[in-house]
Amino acid sequence: MSALILMVRLAVRNVRAHLIKNLVIGVILVFGTFVVVTGAAMIDSLDVVMRRSITTSVTADVQVYDANARDPLALLGDMNFGGSDNGEVADYRTVRDVLAAVPEVRTTLPMGLGNATVFGANELDRTLDSLREAEEAGDPAKVAMLVDRIRRIAGDLRPELERVDNITNDTERVAESRAALDRVIAETFPAEYALSPVPTIDWMDNAVAPLATDGRLAYFRLLGTDLPAFQENFPRMQITRGTGVPANERGIILNESMVEQWLKHPIAREFDAIEKLYDPEDDGPQEVIGESGTIYDRVQRTSRQYRRILYQLDTEEIAVLEPKLRALLADQSTDMPGLLKAYLAVSDENFATRKAFFYTEIAPLVRLYDINVGDTLPLRAFTKSGYLKSLNVKVYGVYSYTGVAKDDSAAGAYCLVDMLTFRDLYGKMTDAQRAELHDIKAAVGAVELSGGTIEDQLFGGGSALEAEVATTSTLAALDDVSFGRADARVQQTFTQDQMESGVVTNIAIFLKDPDASEAGIAAILAATDAAGLTLTAVGWKTASGFIGQAAMMIQLVLFVAVLVLFLVAIVIINIALVLATLERTAEIGTMRALGAQARFVTLLLVVESQLVGLVSAVFGGGLAIGFVNWLNDFGVPADNDFLSILFGGKAMYPEWRPENVALGVGLVLAVSFVATIYPAILAARVPPVVALQGKE
Amino acid sequence: MLTLLLAALAFAAPTAEEMVKRLSVIDDRQANSGDYKSLVYIENKQAGKSDLVYQAVVYRRDADDKLIILFVKPQSEAGKGYLRLDKNMFLYDPTVGKWERRTERERIGGTSSNRQDFDESRLAVEFTPSFVADEKLGSYAVEHLKLAVKPGADVAFPSAELWIDKATGNTLKRQDFADSGRLMRTTYYPAWNKMKSETKGADVYFPKEIRIIDEVEKGTSTTVVIQEVDLKALDPNIFTKAWLEAKSR
């Protein structure tokens, strides 16, 4: 013990004697510790936030799906842009029962992935639909208002037609369109319309409506599931508008980022997009739009989209809005289209005012969102059997994930639907449907071509090309056929049993111990294999697809960066310590001449380097803890959608763990030891006489 | 010498007027001055997918450019329909009760067929023909024409080639091309039926069967069989949205 105390005292003395040299080495060791502790904390934090973000939003801990699927499951996106084929699990209940017996499994959730579209009619089509409904409802005031709106739209389209006339050679069509618009614009049109409303609406459907800009098609990524259980098991999902879908009822909950990006009024989206370009921290004058460049051109294009506001306004609404616009623009002479164009030509100086005006004065008068809570959404999808399937689904609410900006396309912008709606749109053919198709085919008996070229088979025989036929009676019978209400064929409510029985594309599994996912996957696969189910199970990182792989890549890059930095530090530390030790050969010779054993000298040098290493590691570790705490206070910002998915929010708030510090300190001490021991042994081996002569 | 001259005349390319006349003959033979109704079977085959099968009733009033394709089978598709009025085509789905505007390129029921396969023939009105060659198609002697769309015509594809049987004047094969010159589909008409029309006072021709080969999605083909035709006058109110909607009420 006394020898150890002596050694430590000697070591402290020596460190102080070579203070400058040891300070240099210490700084390098501090850097090394700092890099390791910070890097390890960042990698761990990223893993933790990713797991928290992804497993609590859509993937759960493990996903199970068809082992024979053409494409791997990628819940947060892949390079197939939603066109992946993940196969199918024929019956959820069967798999659920098998998994219920696996001790590692806490709970399971059925999932069905699919895509659907919603056709957005153009503004004239919408107005004509409303007019038709108003006629059916016998609402003369609304009819008058809508006829007036149509006339106003026609009046606005008329000059556009003259521009088309200058660039098209289809003069006949332009003349027809001109005549149609002139008829609607004419003062006599309301009276003419009143004489025969429905035929006039039909005529406008064909002659006038096609002249307006085409409507927009909205794309929906659907995730069918047990909606109440989904809400319960994915706590980050929060309903921001409306409500959840009641248990055992059909319905859809829209994803907020999807709503903001695809269903919001295009002018509102433009205002939102431009506003994002301004630095919120900077109160001074900022130039985003400027007087030229991409954003300026975009603003000019937006100003030409004034019709997107004008066509949604009634006469009374224009009467309200027009004076406000005149006051805002200090313009008393321009007409309403001109006012709107001028209003939309925003600049850096007036952007904030114009945007505020839009949301306070214009937004209440127009459809800010194409689809709102309470609306019925006509979803349409190509089914697995190839038929086009449409279905009306009620919008119950809008959801987002906590911590994610509402306009970020985060966490796979899925709209959540009930399982039966998913299955209807998925359209797996039943035996009865298959039999029906077989009967239709058999009744017609169309010959299937096979062997040889088509032309040889069809035209090689030289048979007569013409035959005379007579009218048959079947067709007349079809004239009076009625198919009954199609919506009545759709089962509106369902039982839990019906929801659980049937096809799904994948199953989300929550483990009792999320940290033991490898063991969980092994147990799940063992159980499904034993039950004869051809399923595969993957962890949340793999199941998340592109995002998970990219995240793993980021972690790998981060790890390699830390490793490289640390390796560089090791080399420098090593060289510095070797040189420092060898420089002290004469001193070592003196110690040896005074009776110090080689072992004592070696140990002394090691203790010295460990002392320097320990002090530096503690200092470096402390610095790293301070830095990570600082990052935890301010956050590592997620500048884009990708990072916001990874971080599960707008920023990551990293945390250090004792094992990160232990790793940094331990590594630095180990490096100090390795770097010292060899030169120390060499130096201690030098005979004292030689060392004192300074020959080594 | 005289034999040579006759042979040369026989092989001489037809004039532009003659070619237009040939197209007009094809159009006229298929047109009925009154209404037209047919029961059609549509079958679509696509590699790796199950067959799509439909039975539909086609209603036409050629004089007014009106057309309805009303699906009657299978049960899940019954009540869906296309309505063409002038140059507008709409699709109605009774499950959602909505009408959608569709384009000329609409694949009817997701098959490789489009509106022109069910509508009256308007070759002479929509295209300008040019002669390619006299050829053989299987065991039939055919005249091969190239067709270029006329300005303002609403067609699915801007150019086509036609093989017309020299003996009967019936179209046996047609190829449609995109703007880029890419072959989009090949259509065969292996047999034709004709029926006496009281309103026309002559025969009305219609293909017994149409075989459509999708040249873009390889392995995809559609067969249309015209099972029955009725040329009696139709209810005047058929060609409206309300009529099609009423079928599913």
Image: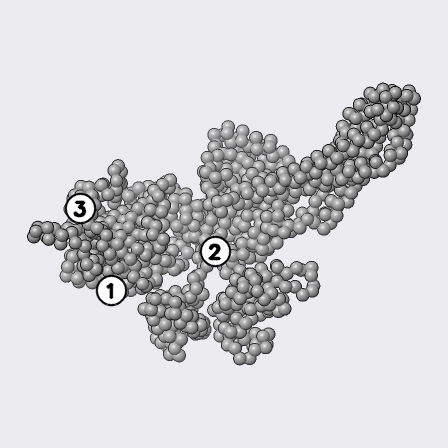
Amino acid under disc 1: Ala
Q: Mark 1 points at which residue?
A: B63
Query: Residue type at mark 2?
Result: Ala
**For this view, does B105 lie left or right of residue A278?**
left
Residue depicted at 21% across the width and 53% down the height: B206
> What amino acid is at disc 3?
Tyr
Q: In the rendered image, which residue does mark 3 sit on?
A: B140
Residue A218's disc number: 2
Between marks 2 and 3, how big is the CA–CA gap? Answer: 50 Å
Tell me, yes or no, if residue A472 can be seen here.
no
The residue under the point 41% across, 46% down is A383
Q: Mark 3: few, some, or many residues within 10 Å (few <14, many ≥20)?
A: some
Element type at mark 3: strand
Circle 1 crowding by C-alpha within 10 Å: few under 14, some 14–19, many from 20: few
In this rendering, do the residues under marks 1 and 2 share a single chain?
no
Mark number for residue B124? none
The correct choice, above or below, for B9 with respect to B52 in the image is below
Closer to us: mark 2 or mark 3? 3
Q: Which chain carries label 3?
A: B
Helix, strand or loop under label 1: helix
Q: Which of the 4 image quarters holds residue A606?
A: top right
